[in-house]
Every structure is written in C-alpha cells, then in structure tokens.
Amino acid sequence: MTGLVWVMFAVGIVAVAAILTFVVIAIVQVAHAGLGYIYKVLWVAAIVVFPVFGTIAWYLLGDRTKALERAITAHTL
C-alpha cells in the first residue's frame, strides 16, 4: 500500500472511532436523562438506527430538563 492509502485508512479509523464515541456518550446521556421510558427507548433507537443524525439530533434537541430551562430563563430575565 502506498503512503496515501495508509493516511486515508488512518483517517477513516479515527473518524469511525469518533462517531462511536459520540454515539456511546449520547446513549449514556439518554439513559441518565429525566425522560420517560418510552422517550428513552425512542431516542436510543434513533441514535442506533441513524448514528450520525440521531446523535446530532440528541445534542441539539435532546434532554430539556427543568434545570436547563431555569438556567436559560435566568439569563434572559
């Protein structure tokens, strides 16, 4: 294999490792979130079926707890 192929292979391995890391972190966050059981199951299913888009959706739209709402409203008042 040429040097470029090795570099592309290494970049691919790092990218897959990063995606898997974010997926696992998102699933752990879902498990600890203050959501109902069915919502947790749906979020985990979305993350597993669509790893990239499901994880991004979780980080953008996910756990909206009362503490977060209080923090947001405290800064806007």
Image (spheres, rainbow, N blue to C red):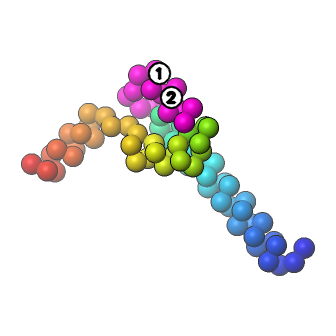
- Whether the magenta-drawn stretch holds residue 33 is answered as yes
Q: Identify the residue at the far left of this view.
A: 77
Q: Nearer the viewer, residue 25 or 52?
A: 52
The answer to the question of whether label 2 and label 1 lie on touching residues, with beta carbons closer than 8 A, is yes
**Residue drawn at 63 percent across, 48 percent down:** 20
Q: Is residue 11 above or below residue 73?
A: below
Answer whether residue 24 is visible to the viewer in this image. no
Instruction: Please provide the residue range marked out in magenta.
Output: 31-46
Q: Is residue 35 above or below residue 18?
A: above
* Disc 2 from disc 1: Cα separation: 6 Å
Mark 2: few/some/many CA within 10 Å (<14, 14-19, 20+): few
Left or right position of 71 against 42: left
Q: Nearer the viewer, residue 70 or 2?
A: 2
What's the amino acid at mark 2? Leu
Q: Main secondary structure of the magenta part?
A: helix
**Residue drawn at 66 percent across, 54 percent down:** 17
Mark 1: few/some/many CA within 10 Å (<14, 14-19, 20+): few
* Residue that mark 1 sits on: 38
Left or right position of 61 against 42: left
What's the amino acid at mark 1? Ile
**Residue drawn at 61 percent across, 52 percent down:** 19
Q: Identify the residue at the far top of this view.
A: 37
Which quarter of the rendered picture does the N terminus lie within?
bottom right
- Whether the magenta-drawn stretch holds residue 63 is answered as no
Give the x, y percent position of residue 41: 52, 26
* Residue that mark 2 sits on: 42
